[in-house]
Image: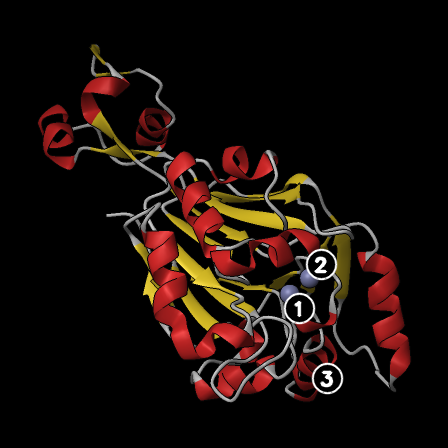
Amino acid sequence: MADKIRLTFLGTSSAIPTAKRNHPAILLDYKGEHILFDCGEGTQRQFRKARLNPCKVNRILISHWHADHILGIPGLLQTLGLQKYNQTIFIYGPRGTKKFMKRILDTFIFKEKYSIKIEEVQGKFFETDDFYLEAKSMTHGIPCNAYSFVVKDKLRIDKKKLSKSKIPSGPLISKLKQGKDVSYKGKKYKAKNLTYLEKGKKVSVVMDTSMNKKIVSFVKDSDLLICESSFDSNFKDKAKEYLHLTSEQAGQIAKKSKSKKLILIHISQRHEKDMESILNQAKREFKNVSIVKDLDDVEV
Ligand SMILES: [Zn+2]
Ligand SMILES: [Zn+2]
C-alpha cells in the first residue's frame, strides 16, 4: 500500500474570514514533508486548534499575493524563530514573490535565525525520487499559481514471486525496482515478472482564478482536486468580473479532468448560510464533491 497523503484544511474562507471560516491555508503531510498551501491571516492559530506543530512546515506554496492568501506569513515566520526552528523553510510563489517577501521581512524587526529560501516557480520545481511539485499560472489579474503534488508511480517487488528466485536483497533488487532484468546463479530474471506497478497519487490545489483553458490539463487525473469556488452560479457574472470560479465551473473542471474527488474551498461569506445550493450546483456536474469545514482533514 502506498503511503497516505494527509490534508488538513486550516482555513477555507475567501477574502473575508467569518466566525466559522479562517483565511485560506491547507497543510499537506506526506512522509516527513509538511507543505503549506497559502497562509492566510491567523493560520498559525489554526495549527494550534488542529493540534499540529507549525514548526514542522518545511515548504510554503503561495498561490498569489492577494492579502487573504498571505497575511499569516509574518506571524508564522516569527513563531518559527521563537520556537528555534532549525531547518530551511522554502517559500515558493508566482512572479513577484521575492519582492513581496522582502517587503514583509522589512516591515517588522525580524532577526533571521534560520534560513529562508524564496523561489518564483513555474512548471516542475521540486522533485525527489518519490514525488514532485508543479506550478501552473492561472488567470486572476495578477500572477497566480495553481499547484500539484504528485507521488510517482513505483515498481514494487512481488515478495511471493521473489522468494522462489532466492535473489538476496541488495543491488540486484535495486535493479529490479528500476525495471531492469537481472541474472542470479546463471539464471535470468525479467523485472516485469517479479514486480508490480504501484500507482502514484496526485493532489491539485486551484486557488483564485477565472475559468481558463489551462486548468483541466494541469489537474488531469487528480486523485483529489481542491478548487476555489467563490460563488454559486447566480453570481456567475460576478465570478467572471472578479476572475473567480463558480461551484458549477469547479464541478465541470473535476469532470473534464477525470479527477476522482473534488473539494470546494474559498467560498464567499455571502453563501455561508446556504452551502447546500453551492454544493448541489457542483454535484450536477460531478458527483464526488464535498465542502470542507475549517480543521477538517482528509486522506488520499
Ligand atoms: Zn482569495
Ligand atoms: Zn485573489
Query: Does the residue tagged 1 have its C-beta within 8 Å of any atom of ligand 1?
Result: yes
Identify residue type, mark 2.
Answer: His
- Which comes sooner in the sequence, label 3 or label 1? 1
Q: Mark 3 or mark 1: which is in front?
A: 1
Q: Dot 2 lies on which element?
A: loop
Mark 1 vs mark 2, CA separation in Å: 7 Å
Residue 211 position by quadrant: top right
Mark 3 vs mark 2, CA separation in Å: 21 Å
- Which comes sooner in the sequence, label 1 or label 2? 2
Q: Residue at x 64, y 72 (%)?
A: 15
Mark 3 vs mark 1, CA separation in Å: 17 Å
Badge 1: few (under 14), some or many (20 or more) residues near its Cα, within 10 Å? many
Residue 207 position by quadrant: bottom right
Q: Nearer the viewer, residue 163 or 249?
A: 249
Quarter of the rendering occupied by the C terminus: bottom left
Where is residue 172 drawn, in percent x and y? Answer: 32, 26
Q: Residue at x 84, y 83 (%)?
A: 110
Where is residue 53 drawn, in percent x and y? Answer: 50, 81
Residue wearing tag 1: 69
- Which comes sooner in the sequence, label 3 or label 2? 2
Query: Does the residue tagged 2 have its C-beta within 8 Å of any atom of ligand 2?
Result: yes
Q: Nearer the viewer, residue 280 or 219?
A: 280
* Contact between labelled residues 2 and 1, with CB atoms less than 8 Å apart: yes
* Contact between labelled residues 2 and 3, with CB atoms less than 8 Å apart: no
Mark carried by residue 64: 2
Q: Is 261 left, or right, of 81 in this rendering?
A: left
